[in-house]
């Protein structure tokens, strides 16, 4: 955990933090996790959706942490079918691949 905090720059002054818990027993409920986080994290919950996630993402830090520096930072092209920026979509695909590879080793 401490290594992840350092790698992703989580400090006492962090303003955006994504927390998720994957329960392995039925006793761990949303209400219990929410109450626990409310005790230890100063902040307000926000909806977890693509727009919120992209709004709080530090793309530079993500690219550095996963060694994705050669990807373009922004793309002028937009995918009209879903309104997504092609550069963002490419970054998401590469990021998921990097995470999967790290988990496999």
Image (cartoon, grey):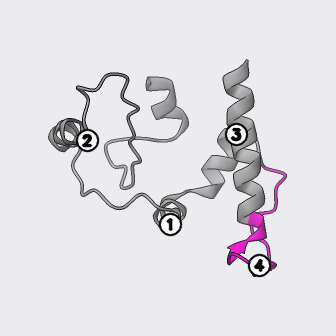
Magenta stretch, overall SS: loop
Q: Earlier in the sequence, mark 4 or mark 1?
A: 1
Give the labeled residue for mark 1.
55
Q: Quadrant of the C terminus?
A: top right
Q: Earlier in the sequence, mark 3 or mark 4?
A: 3
Q: Nearer the viewer, mark 1 or mark 2?
A: 2
- Tag on residue 78? 4
Q: Quadrant of the N terminus?
A: top left
Residue at image point 75% right, 81% down: 80
Q: Earlier in the sequence, mark 1 or mark 2?
A: 2
Q: Measured along the vertical axis of the image, is residue 1 above or below residue 30?
A: above
Q: Nearer the viewer, mark 3 or mark 4?
A: 4
Give the labeled residue for mark 2.
30
Write the start and end of the magenta stretch as one range: 69-87
Q: Earlier in the sequence, mark 2 or mark 4?
A: 2
Does dot 2 land on a helix, a strand or a loop? helix
The answer to whether marks 2 and 4 mark residues whose Cβ atoms lie closer than 8 Å is no
Mark 1: give few (<14), some (14-19) or many (20+) Cα within 10 Å. few
From the viewer's side, name the closer residue of 31 and 7: 31
Q: Earlier in the sequence, mark 3 or mark 2?
A: 2
Q: Measured along the vertical axis of the image, is residue 104 above or below residue 39?
A: above
């Amino acid at each position: 955990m401490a290594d992840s905090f350092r790698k992703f720059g989580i400090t006492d002054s962090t303003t955006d933090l994504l927390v998720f818990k994957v329960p392995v027993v039925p006793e761990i409920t949303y209400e219990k996790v929410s109450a626990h986080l409310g005790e230890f994290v100063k902040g307000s919950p926000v909806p977890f959706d693509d727009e919120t996630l992209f709004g709080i993402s530090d793309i530079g830090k993500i690219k550095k942490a996963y060694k994705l520096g050669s990807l373009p930072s922004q793309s002028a092209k937009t995918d009209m079918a879903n309104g997504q920026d092609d550069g963002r979509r490419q970054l998401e695909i590469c990021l998921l691949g990097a995470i999967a590879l790290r988990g496999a080793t």
